[in-house]
Amino acid sequence: MYASVENGDRNRSQRPDSLAGSATSFLVIGLVIGFAIGASAVYLVFNILKPAQSPTLGRLELLPDEKYIVAVSRLIASANKSVHVIMYVAKYDPKQSAEEDPANMLLELLAGAKRKGLDVRVVVDDVTKQSYPETIDYLKSRGVPVRLDPKAGVTTHAKVVIVDGEWVVIGSHNWTQSALSSNKEYSILIRSSELAAKVEEYFEELWSNGRSA
């Protein structure tokens, strides 16, 4: 009788520990599940809200106003293979030096790239030939091939520079002193071989169908 009472007392004394152990286990399991759910939610939110990454854009730089001349002059000066230009208006001023006129500086850099043996070619609109024939004369005298766009009645308003089939500058800047030093202009610089190849196709179409300058 006493033994059964002792056993009963012993069993009753062990129950609180068992319940405590069960509660602890449930608490641990709950924390693990909660952590997993929380981590999954954070992952989903991060991947939904983070900016989409484009595989085609290796680098993009904004070139407002005079930042254009800094970026483009460096690109042309450091070119290793090619410099292809589509320019609505390019104005060479024989009365000014490269230090005085940023457009002269860019044109002289093209001549320098040609002297290094690079593939340098320029497509311009009729406006350049009609208003600034000195530009074409200057480039041709330095061995830089120049062509007019395919049709006289169609304006080629693009302002594009492609360097080494990898860098593309496109925007509003013409190669004139005012556009490069005082106008409010905006262009962008893109580093992407994939996109540059697309722009090269556009250039080559203009070039192959271009008219003699």
Image (tube, rainbow, N blue to C red):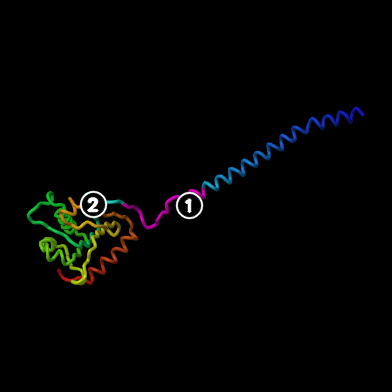
Q: Residues within 10 Å of mark 1 (few under 14, many from 20)?
A: few
Indicate which label's residue lies in the foreground, 1 or 2: 1
Name the amino acid, label 1: Ile
Name the amino acid, label 2: Tyr
Residue denoted by label 1: 48
Residue 14: percent from the left, percent from the top? 78, 32
Residue 29: percent from the left, percent from the top? 65, 42
First in residue order: circle 1 vs circle 2 = 1
Secondary structure beneath dot 2 equals: helix
Q: Residue at x 89, y 31 (%)?
A: 4
Q: Pointer 1 and pointer 2: residues touching (CB < 8 Å)?
A: no
Residue denoted by label 2: 68
Locate residue 187 relative to residue 108 in the image: left or right. right
Residue numbers of the magenta segment: 43-60
Asked if residue 63 is among those painted magenta in the image, a careful observer would answer no
Locate residue 108 relative to residue 202 in the image: left or right. left
Q: Residue at x 15, y 63 (%)?
A: 128
Q: Residues within 10 Å of mark 2 (few under 14, many from 20)?
A: many
Asked if residue 56 is among those painted magenta in the image, a careful observer would answer yes
Residue 55: percent from the left, percent from the top? 40, 57
Q: Quadrant of residue 147?
A: bottom left
Quarter of the image with the N terminus in it:
top right
In the image, farthest residue toward the left = 95
Q: Quadrant of residue 132?
A: bottom left
Spatial CA distance of label 1 from label 2 is 35 Å
Secondary structure beneath dot 1 equals: helix
The relative height of residue 1 versus residue 108 in the rendered view (above or below) is: above
Residue 161: percent from the left, percent from the top? 24, 59
Closest to the observer, 128 or 118:
128
The relative height of residue 102 versus residue 200 in the rendered view (above or below) is: above
Closest to the observer, 146 or 33:
33
